[in-house]
């Protein structure tokens, strides 16, 4: 898997023959289309599956595609095109939030590489469970004593741990990393993310 | 068919269907403009009054009927949209009109004499009046509209608004959130960029939306609110004080006296409005035999009455900002919308909480309609450089084992959005699956709001757990849910029977539309009868005048025949037989046409002669 998603290798647009830039519509000629089988959150942005994305490029692409796909801009079109605009926008929005969320993006990339990896690696190691239980207790204590400063500190620490594991998962995916190791890391970050939510108000 | 230059067919108006007032606006080359009624005001009070003779009146005249016709005058119907009796609580005590349970659906109905009306029908009557005013102002028919709703309206309330439009014969091209519309109206004036908080406190609802605006893209990042908090509640608080005073003085409980209730409601609203400028207001209450009671209310007392409600709005602001991940110092602008933002305490609390002086340049009663007109123009293909990305205000999900709520779409997701879920069967040869859909933020469905029950049927019988029914929950740009399903093994499109919990089924809406068309026919027939009577009158008078002209010697036979026809025509005009009257007018008209042709020349000469002799003398 390449580090930043390469050009998609999407088949040329059936209408104009250009690179469409998305599996949902053709940015070159503006035609909306039913998504072909095998499309995914990456192809909707004209990318191959990738662990890391260029956030600014995603934002830009999102706006260009939204201006094409959003039902507001297809209001005068036949009902079939309007329906495509609604479902296409929904799929675009799903892809957008997935690609900009490190956890969800990595899970999507892993699922395309090895669809069963997450399911196969559900059992977490005793060492990890110990580590997470300690963190959980610290949060519980800070919460019970109403110590907001301590909670903030714990949250920052938790974020650093999550980021480190996600970076490591991305590295594994970029190289010829083993899907099982990536799946394990992603399960662990899921647990930490839940705990991070508990530090909030 | 000829093509008209102005193509009024394509005109899309923006409608703010408010709790207290409604109004329309349209895009012009000089920007959005509100459409004025005959009274030179764009505001149409959202009030419908049903008269003794079955007639309905809407707007200002209806509002004027509130005291004399309290039980048949419906205000604040927006607060009833998509709601059940259990949602309204003791609020119904302060309504002079009667609210009843809707029967099969939990949706409430308004009872007027023997008939009941759904809130959708009441809203449709108001929309009809807005449309009439708009058509009069524009000089052509209007078919399409963008209608605004509170951002925090749930699926049932949005669907109810769409149904109201359909009943009114309007195509609702889009349901737009009020704070978002307001942001559009502000943005167009100044091309603002940055993070904007819209605080919208109207007559019945409160919304707060956090938007990020960049290069014509209006992206709502979070919204929060309360669809049951607004100016009406402040009126109710003042009403309660007045009623207490009367009870204290006379021992009378006014709850059961609709005339008095409406009078007090109007007084309370007026006092509230005066307190925005004055620090103390007085009201003399006529107690009949007793000395009149003097009710005084200081601004401070009023502020104490509403402070708890306003604190709730501030809590909503904080929660929306937290969801948006926006700190106070990142807020660039705060925008005020809704009549209740005129209350000084609102301004002060918001300023203290958000650290920004709110913008009030645009009339808070008009800004939403202006924004709706801008969005209407986008949909009509006019404005192209504007992109509105709005969100779903409440999480959407299904009931799972043990009454747990499983969220499929989380709140503040950009719409349109969708989620897919696989369902299977639990017993062999089961060919139907029930799915209960809820909206809310709590863990148990008992604490969320049920949107409806979906029944999947029509897939082949298979052993338990074998069918895989993929159900797609799609929320469109209006924030309204549609559900589709497909059984993956057989590929059969499963059919879905939707029973809305607080709304109307498609069949019910169609029924109401049909009924209103029947009514429209009756209305049309009544109007035609009146017109024919007038025509018959004119024919009778005209013919008599000709017959009576001394200068015109009409043969006796013709005269006798015409006299007989005239008597017959007058008799028909006095009756209700529309077809007979129509035929009689037609044949008499044809007959007298000959008479007219024969004598018209003579008549003109006679007229001229008379005129000449008059001027001579």
Image (tube, rainbow, N blue to C red):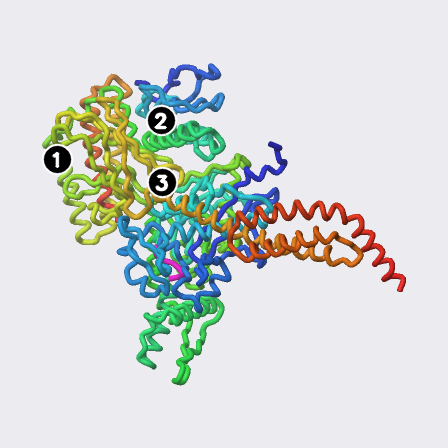
- The residue labelled by disc 2 is A53
Q: Chain of mark 1?
A: A
Q: Nearer the viewer, mark 3 or mark 2?
A: 3
- The residue labelled by disc 3 is B480
Residue A160 occupies which quadrant of the picture? top left
Query: What mark, if any, has residue B217 been given in the picture?
Result: none
Q: Chain of mark 3?
A: B
Q: Chain of mark 2?
A: A
Q: Earlier in the sequence, mark 2 or mark 1?
A: 2
Instruction: Please state which of residues A130 and B300 is positioned toward the viewer in this rendering.
Output: B300
B251 is higher (above) or lower (below) than B563: below
User: Are there few (<14), some (14-19), or many (20+) residues within 10 Å of tag 1?
Assistant: few
Q: Secondary structure at mark 1?
A: helix
Which residues fall within the magenta stretch?
B228-232
Outermost residue toward the front in this view: B557
Q: Residue at x 42, y 53 (%)?
A: B200
Where is residue B557 shown, x and y percent of the image?
Answer: 70, 51
Q: Residue at x 54, y 55 (%)?
A: B42
Q: Residue at x 80, y 48 (%)?
A: B601
């Amino acid at each position: 898997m390449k580090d930043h998603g390469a050009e998609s290798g999407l088949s040329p647009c059936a209408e104009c023959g250009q690179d469409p830039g998305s599996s949902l519509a053709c940015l070159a000629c503006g035609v909306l289309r039913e998504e072909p089988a095998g499309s995914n959150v990456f192809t909707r942005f004209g990318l191959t599956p990738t662990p890391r994305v260029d956030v600014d490029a995603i934002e830009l692409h999102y706006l260009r595609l939204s201006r094409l796909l959003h039902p507001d801009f297809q209001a005068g079109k036949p009902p079939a095109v309007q329906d495509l605009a609604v479902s296409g926008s929904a799929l675009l929005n799903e892809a957008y939030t997935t690609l900009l969320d490190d956890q969800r993006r990595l899970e999507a990339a892993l699922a395309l590489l090895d669809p069963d990896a997450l399911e196969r690696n559900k059992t977490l190691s005793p060492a990890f469970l110990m580590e997470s239980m300690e963190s959980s207790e610290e949060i519980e204590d800070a919460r019970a004593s109403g110590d907001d400063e301590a909670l903030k500190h714990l949250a920052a620490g938790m974020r650093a741990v999550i980021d480190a594991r996600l970076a490591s998962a991305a590295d594994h995916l970029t190289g010829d990393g083993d899907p099982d190791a990536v799946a394990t890391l992603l399960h662990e970050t899921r647990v930490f993310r839940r705990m991070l939510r508990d530090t909030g108000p | 068919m000829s093509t008209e230059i102005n193509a009024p067919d394509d005109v899309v108006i923006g409608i703010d269907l408010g709790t207290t007032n409604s109004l329309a606006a349209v895009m012009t080359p000089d920007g959005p403009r509100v459409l004025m009624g005959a009274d030179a005001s764009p505001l149409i009070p959202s009030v419908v009054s049903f008269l003794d003779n079955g007639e309905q009146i809407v707007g200002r005249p209806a509002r004027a009927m509130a005291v004399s016709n309290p039980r048949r005058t419906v205000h604040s119907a927006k607060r009833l949209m998509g709601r059940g009796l259990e949602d309204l609580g003791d609020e119904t005590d302060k309504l002079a009109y009667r609210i009843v349970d809707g029967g099969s659906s939990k949706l409430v109905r308004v009872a007027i004499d023997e008939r009941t009306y759904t809130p959708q029908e009441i809203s449709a009557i108001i929309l009809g009046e807005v449309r009439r005013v708009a058509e009069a102002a524009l000089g052509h028919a209007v078919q399409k509209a963008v209608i605004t709703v509170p951002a925090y309206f749930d699926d049932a309330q949005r669907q109810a608004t769409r149904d109201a439009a359909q009943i009114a014969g309007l195509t609702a091209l889009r349901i737009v959130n009020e704070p978002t519309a307001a942001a559009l109206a502000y943005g167009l004036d100044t091309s603002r960029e940055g993070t904007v908080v819209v605080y919208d406190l109207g007559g019945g609802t409160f919304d707060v939306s956090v938007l990020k605006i960049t290069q014509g893209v209006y992206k709502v990042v979070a919204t929060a609110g309360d669809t049951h908090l607004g100016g009406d509640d402040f009126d109710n608080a003042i009403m309660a004080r007045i009623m207490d005073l009367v009870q204290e003085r006379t021992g009378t409980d006014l709850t059961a006296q609709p005339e008095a209730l409406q009078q007090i409601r109007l007084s309370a609203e007026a006092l509230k409005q005066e307190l925005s400028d004055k620090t103390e207001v007085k009201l003399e209450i006529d107690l009949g035999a007793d000395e009149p009671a003097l009710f005084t209310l200081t601004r401070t007392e009023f502020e104490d009455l509403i402070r708890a409600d306003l604190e709730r709005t501030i809590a909503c602001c904080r929660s929306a900002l937290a969801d948006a991940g926006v700190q106070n110092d990142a807020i660039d602008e705060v925008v005020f919308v809704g009549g209740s933002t005129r209350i000084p305490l609102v301004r002060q609390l918001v300023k203290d909480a958000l650290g920004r002086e709110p913008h009030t340049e645009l009339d808070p009663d008009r800004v939403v309609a202006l924004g709706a007109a801008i969005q209407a123009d986008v949909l009509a293909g006019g404005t192209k450089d504007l992109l509105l990305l709005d969100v779903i205000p409440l999480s959407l999900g299904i009931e799972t084992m043990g009454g747990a709520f499983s969220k499929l779409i989380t709140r503040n997701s950009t719409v349109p959005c969708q989620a897919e879920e696989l369902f299977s069967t639990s017993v062999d040869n089961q060919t139907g699956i029930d799915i209960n859909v809820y909206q809310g933020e709590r863990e148990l469905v008992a604490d969320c709001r049920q949107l409806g029950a979906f029944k999947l049927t029509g897939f082949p019988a298979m052993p338990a757990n074998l069918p895989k029914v993929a159900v797609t929950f799609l929320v469109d740009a209006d924030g309204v849910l549609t559900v589709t399903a497909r059984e993956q093994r057989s590929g059969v499109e499963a059919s879905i029977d939707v029973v809305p919990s607080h709304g109307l089924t498609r069949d019910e809406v169609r029924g109401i539309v049909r009924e209103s068309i029947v009514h429209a026919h009756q209305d049309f027939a009544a109007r035609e009868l009146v017109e024919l009577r007038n025509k018959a009158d004119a024919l009778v008078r005209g013919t008599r005048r000709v017959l009576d002209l001394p200068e015109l010697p009409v043969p006796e036979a013709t005269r006798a025949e015409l006299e007989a026809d005239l008597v017959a025509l007058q008799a028909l005009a006095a009756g209700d037989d529309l077809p007979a009257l129509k035929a009689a007018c037609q044949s008499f008209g044809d007959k007298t046409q000959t008479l007219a042709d024969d004598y018209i020349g003579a008549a003109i000469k006679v007229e001229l002669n008379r005129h000449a002799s008059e001027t001579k003398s």
